[in-house]
Image: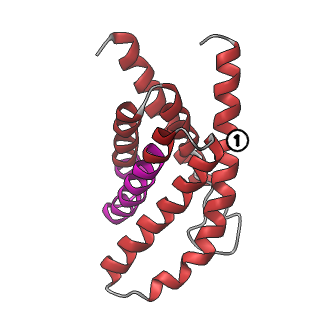
């Protein structure tokens, strides 16, 4: 990999980690446990459109592990990895079709992230009862996905105008 690319990926990892930390410091937006904005996903959607799937996957996985080590627990890392993996696979597939805008790809990512985490929780807790929580998470994932997608699209548009 070229030095410039390594530096760019390192900055993306650092930015996504900072956004993870900032998000962890924000009081819950709703009285519902586990509902978060997903601020680090701004970086993931941006990268998916700016540099591609392979680099985005590398940054996403490294972010999950580093944030898990620094701010989380082994169990939180498992949940995050499941959500991030399913989310990224879905976003990559949707983007490849060239049929969907940034916001749609981001919303799908938000919802798939929640599905990945709930599926993991069902396995870890050995109960399917937790799946009843999915409708609430679909709503929060949709709202967060819209905001994240709009933000990433705005950043990409401004960088294109600046020819960066």
Q: From the image, which quarter does the C terminus lie in? A: top right
Secondary structure, mark 1, is helix
- Mark 1 = which residue? 150
Mark yes or no: residue 26 visible.
Answer: no
Q: Which residue is pictured at 63% across the width and 36% down the height?
A: 152
**Front in this rendered view, residue 26 or 2:** 2
Q: Position of residue 71 (x, y in %)?
A: 43, 52
Residue 3 picture location, percent across and down: 34, 11
Disc count in the image? Answer: 1
| Within-10-Å neighbours for mark 1: few <14, some 14–19, many 20+ | some
The residue sitting at 40% across, 86% down in the picture is 128
Q: Is residue 119 left or right of residue 19?
A: left
Residue in view at x 63 percent, y 75 percent: 136
Q: Is residue 124 above or below residue 111?
A: below
Judge whether residue 100 can be spotted in this image.
yes
| Region in magenta | 67-92
In the image, taking residue 4 as reference, residue 16 lies left or right, namely: right
Q: Is residue 111 above or below residue 85?
A: below
* Rendering coords of residue 10 (x, y %): 41, 26
Q: Is most of the magenta stretch helix, strand or loop?
A: helix
Query: Quick check: 36 above or below 92?
Result: below
**Per the image, is 87 magenta?**
yes
Q: Dividing the picture into quarters, in which one does residue 80 lie? A: bottom left
Residue 21 part of the magenta segment = no
């Amino acid at each position: 990999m070229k030095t410039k690319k390594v530096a760019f990926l390192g900055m993306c990892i650092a930015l996504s980690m900072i956004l993870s930390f900032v998000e962890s410091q924000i009081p819950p937006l709703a009285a519902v446990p586990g509902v978060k904005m997903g601020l680090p996903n701004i970086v993931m959607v941006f990268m998916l459109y700016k540099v591609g799937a392979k680099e985005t996957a590398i940054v996403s996985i490294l972010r999950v592990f580093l944030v898990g080590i620094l701010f989380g627990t082994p169990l939180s890392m498992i949940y995050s990895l499941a959500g991030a993996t399913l989310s990224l696979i879905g976003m990559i597939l949707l983007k490849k079709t060239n049929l969907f805008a940034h916001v749609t790809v981001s919303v799908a990512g938000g919802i798939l992230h929640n599905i990945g985490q709930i599926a993991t929780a069902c396995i870890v807790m050995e109960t399917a009862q937790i799946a009843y929580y999915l409708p609430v998470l679909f709503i929060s994932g949709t709202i967060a996905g819209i905001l994240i997608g709009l933000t990433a699209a705005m950043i990409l548009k401004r960088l294109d105008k600046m020819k960066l």
